[in-house]
Image (spheres, grey):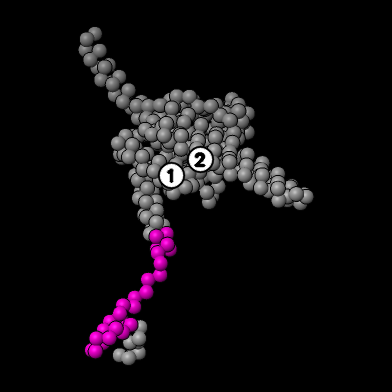
Amino acid sequence: MRKILILIIPLAILYGCKNNNLITVDGTIKKNSRDYIAISSIEVTSITFIDSVKIGKNGHFKFRVKAGEPDFYQVGFTSSNFITLLAEPGEKIRLSFDDDNLYDGYSVEGSKGSELVRMLDNKLLDTKRKLDSLNVVFGKASTEPGFDTIQTRLTQKAVDLVKAQRRYNINFVINNMSSLASVKAIYQKINDQTYVLYEMRDLQYMKILSDTLTRHYPDSRHTKALVRSLEDGMKQLNADKINQLIETLPEAKLDPDLKDINGRKVALSSLRGKY
């Protein structure tokens, strides 16, 4: 009996180690019309496909992914219909979707990082929808009398929404400094051209976050990418400051007074063309 236990214990330890390197994603789509769903790894500048599985008749699907560190993943159907996870090795994540518009209302359990990401994405989605609604109202009002007044009011509402989203992301970063989820908060965009954290002074939050994550996740490619982005941002900030300083300086004229052989002062400009 003792010999059997000696054999079982190492096997149990080995099995436990293997499980600790696995991420399990167990999901259910209540109203589904799709056949397959995919999971991909989110690299710094690209998406890498990992696997796809068939969705059961009851809307159930399951992924098992080997992982060595916390990382971002996409689970979804297309490049515009997916949700983002921040999963750690050993996590057993449970997802529940109302229908196959995945990003529009879903729940996640078993992964703190993924829940933080869900909160971030939901807040930004809400802001974008409100901005879209303002654009619709703006378009309809453009042909109405008194449009100038309406335009000012709608523009201010849009500005307030963007500012509120920025404050939300800043508070998120401050309250989640030790989570890679804050990297997503740094890089979120209102649209293709506009980051949520759009002011140069927001580099201070990137600096604090990069310092913290370098201590917690020094080998993470997402931490390293954040550090590089900070360095690029600081270079741009310094360049902008130098350009602003140059623009405020009075025009410099190099025209010192020299003396001729008789001791009389002669302007340098008066010598042009003589030599």
Q: Nearer the viewer, residue 264 or 135?
A: 264
State the image quarter where residue 245 is shown.
Answer: bottom left
Q: Is residue 251 magenta?
A: yes
Question: Can residue 243 be seen in the rendering of this structure?
Answer: no
Mark 2 surroundings: few (<14), some (14-19) or many (≥20) residues within 10 A: many
Residue at mark 2: 166
Mark 1: amino acid: Asp
x and y, in percent, of residue 233 in the image = 39, 51
State the image quarter where residue 177 is shown.
Answer: top left
x and y, in percent, of residue 73 in the image = 45, 37
Are the residues tagged 1 and 2 within 8 Å (C-beta)?
A: yes
Residue shown at 37%/33% (left/top)?
Answer: 178
Q: CA distance from mark 1 to mark 2?
A: 10 Å
Mark 2: amino acid: Arg
Q: Is residue 227 left or right of residue 202?
A: left
State the extent of the magenta-drawn residues as a range: 243-268
